[in-house]
Amino acid sequence: MCEFVSWIEKDGKCYFLTAADLASKRGKQLIKHCKNDDDLVGHGAIRWFYGEFTGGTERECTDFASPDNFPREIVAALIAGKFRSMGSPLGMLNDMARVKYEEIKQTAWAKYKEIEQPALWDLITQAASRSRAWQ
């Protein structure tokens, strides 16, 4: 699976997908084609969206510490907010936001763990009851 942000460099052009691309008619077709939202940021999705071209250099970067890590077109799209809802680049958070994110994540994880065990037990006992009914 490719990482957010992924792009393909070919013939001096940088190919990548934005939220507007995914909202377009072709983008909606791509969403149906991929079936998995995680694939929408990948090289395969980029190739499919732009007509399944071949060649080029596939690139991806998750290090948002410096704009120098990305092509200028992607930096401009990031600044303009064109990737909203497409990924969760935690490296773009400032220190205060990262601390808040970790607090929320820990609280959510704790609640999940509270619910997970009883829910699994219910599923197991329901499955066992159904299997006994067939005997």
Image (cartoon, grey):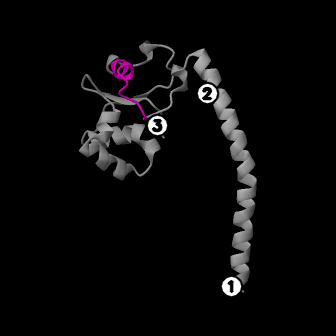
Q: Residue at x 38, y 18 (%)?
A: 79
Q: How far apart are labels 1 and 3 at the CA level?
A: 45 Å
Residue 32 position in % (x across, y down):
35, 52
As drawn, is 49 to the left or to the right of 112? left
Q: How far apart are labels 3 and 2 at the CA level?
A: 23 Å
Residue 75 within the segment the image draws in magenta: yes
Residue 4 position in % (x across, y down):
46, 31
Q: In the depicted view, which residue is nearer to us: 5 or 86?
A: 86
In the image, which disc is placed on residue 54? none
Q: In the depicted view, which residue is nearer to us: 125 or 64?
A: 125
Q: Quadrant of residue 40?
A: top left
Answer few, some or many: residues within 10 Å of disc 1's Cα (few below 14, many 20 plus, some between 14 and 19).
few
Q: How far apart are labels 2 and 1 at the CA level?
A: 48 Å
Q: Check disc 3 and report the residue beneath it.
A: 2
For marks 1 and 3, give the one nearer the viewer.
1
Q: Residue at x 56, y 16 (%)?
A: 94
Q: Check disc 2 and report the residue beneath it.
A: 101
Q: How many marks?
A: 3
Residue 36 position in % (x across, y down):
44, 49
Q: Which residues are magenta?
A: 74-85
- The quadrant in which the C terminus is found is bottom right
On the question of residue 12 being in view, the answer is: yes
In the image, which disc is placed on residue 134? 1
